[in-house]
Image (tube, rainbow, N blue to C red):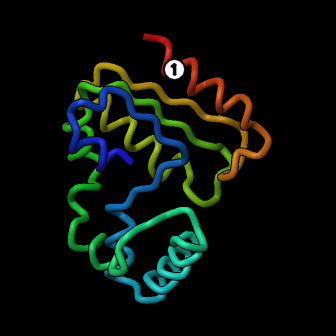
């Protein structure tokens, strides 16, 4: 997650697959109780021990309270000196390229990011049809420099 990496200057390369705009998401959570409930249910499905993610019990309120750290303009300033690879799926209906990947890319470029690359694959959120290509893109990018 870019917000986490922004806190550690020793992290020089960041890749993000099918990213999400948590700043916008937090605004929706705050303004729409139905959306907040839906997000909460989705998070419960991935929460440890049944799912792969370990996070705080009060994640939604934490997200709303700290939304500025997820703002793409803020992040693009903090991360403009890092290597950044943004990857999205053209057919991703969960985190569309238009909603986060492209705006984050544009913010990075507008803030003079020194090494930003964007890749888009003809696939959905799970990348089931292009996982080999996805892995190759990441490995090539990691070892390029």
The residue drawn where x is 29% and y is 19% is 114
Residue lying furthest front: 49
Q: Point out the image quarter for the C terminus.
A: top left
Q: Is residue 84 above or below residue 99?
A: above
Task: Identify the residue shown where x is 29% and y is 79%.
Answer: 61
Task: List x then y, in percent, for residue 5.
Answer: 30, 42
Looking at the image, residue 24 sits to the left or right of residue 94; the answer is left
State the residue in front, 27 or 57.
57
Q: Position of residue 116 (x, y in %)?
A: 39, 25
Residue 137 in the figure: left or right of residue 19? right
Q: What crowding class fits label 1: few (fewer than 14 Cα within 10 Å), some (14-19), or many (20 or more)?
A: some
Front residue of 104 and 145:
145
Residue occupied by mark 1: 141
> Where does residue 104 sit, x and y in percent of width and height?
37, 42
- Picture residue at 29% right of the left edge, 49% below the top: 3
* Above or below, comparing residue 68 to residue 65 in the picture: above
Q: Is residue 15 above or below residue 35?
A: above
């Amino acid at each position: 997650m870019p917000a986490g990496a922004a806190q550690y200057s020793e992290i020089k390369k960041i890749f993000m697959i099918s990213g999400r705009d948590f700043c916008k998401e937090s605004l929706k959570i705050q303004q729409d109780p139905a959306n907040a409930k839906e997000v909460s249910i989705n998070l419960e499905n991935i929460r440890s021990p049944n799912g792969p993610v370990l996070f705080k019990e009060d994640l939604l309120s934490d997200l709303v309270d700290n939304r500025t750290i997820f703002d793409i303009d803020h992040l693009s300033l903090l991360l403009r000196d890092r290597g950044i690879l943004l990857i999205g799926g053209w057919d991703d209906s969960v985190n569309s390229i238009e909603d986060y990947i492209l705006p984050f890319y544009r913010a990075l470029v507008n803030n003079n990011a020194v090494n930003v690359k964007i890749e888009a694959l003809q696939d959905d959120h799970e990348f089931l049809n292009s996982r080999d290509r996805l892995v190759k893109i990441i490995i090539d990018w990691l070892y390029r420099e």
